[in-house]
Image (cartoon, rainbow, N blue to C red):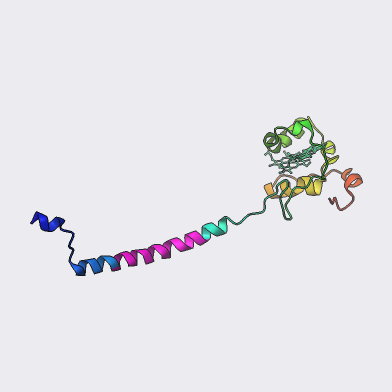
Amino acid sequence: MIARIFSPQINPDFQAFRKERSIICLRIGAKICVPFLVLGLLACQPVQKPELKGEGPLAVVVPRGTATPEYHAPAAKWQVGHGQAINRGDFARRECILCHSPETGCNKCHQYVGTPKIIVPEASLYWGNSNGK
Ligand code: HEC
Ligand code: HEC
């Protein structure tokens, strides 16, 4: 009796049933998984963010050859804290404009994150009316 239970011989009907069942499970699994996989892949497509050295319309542009001031370091801290530094009065927006065009250096990112637009009237002297590159 016990030997029968552990015997490797399984009823062929049952074997066929198991085979079929596993195929059905695979099919259902695929039906569920594939859309998620596709969505996952879509989500992994490069999304354009305002990034220094980024690409596309949101790229933050600093003209090549511009020196990086000491107070930008560490960069991660500056990225987060430059607003506070300006609001504290450590820096004036006008200083930033010497190296950054408001349009391509500040506002692409500000628009994206929802921070007020940087407007410096003097900027047009440096960057032209288009505030271009
Ligand atoms: C890479 C993105 C990015 C760039 C580029 C950028 N900023 Fe910001 N800025 C932010 C973020 C994010 C905040 C909000 C930080 C916070 O909540 O304290 C901010 C906040 C500020 C604030 C404070 C706004 C307020 O109302 O409190 C000022 C002023 C500011 N930025 C000036 C500038 C200037 C000037 C430039 C260009 C020379 C610039 N930023 C470029 C991301 C950026
Ligand atoms: C002397 C030129 C110069 C001045 C003045 C200057 N910057 Fe910059 N800034 C740079 C350069 C160059 C970079 C790029 C640094 C790099 O390549 O890592 C940069 C990068 C940044 C970034 C990071 C952008 C990103 O996407 O990571 C922010 C934000 C920024 N500057 C804000 C300001 C603000 C605000 C001021 C005024 C208080 C200011 N800068 C003044 C030259 C300058």
Q: Is residue 97 left or right of residue 72?
A: right
Is residue 35 one of those drawn in magenta?
A: yes
Q: Is residue 117 left or right of residue 25?
A: right
Q: Quadrant of residue 26?
A: bottom left
Q: Residue at x 80, y 49 (%)?
A: 103
Q: Quadrant of residue 47?
A: bottom right
Query: Magenta span covers which residues?
Result: 20-38
x and y percentages locating residue 51 in the rendered image: 70, 47
Exactly how many numbered labels are in the figure? 0
Q: Residue at x 21, y 66 (%)?
A: 14
x and y percentages locating residue 72 in the rendered image: 75, 34
Is residue 13 one of those drawn in magenta?
A: no
Q: Residue at x 70, y 49 (%)?
A: 50
Q: Residue at x 73, y 50 (%)?
A: 59
The extreme left residue here reads 1
The extreme right residue here reads 125
What secondary structure prevails in the magenta region?
helix
Whether residue 60 is situated above or below residue 18 in the rendered picture: above
Whether residue 46 is situated above or below residue 62 in the rendered picture: below
Q: Is residue 34 left or right of residue 3?
A: right
- The quadrant of the picture showing ligand 2 is top right
Quadrant containing the N terminus in the rendered view: bottom left
x and y percentages locating residue 55 in the rendered image: 72, 53
x and y percentages locating residue 58 in the rendered image: 72, 52
In depth, the one of 121 and 96 nearer the eye is 96
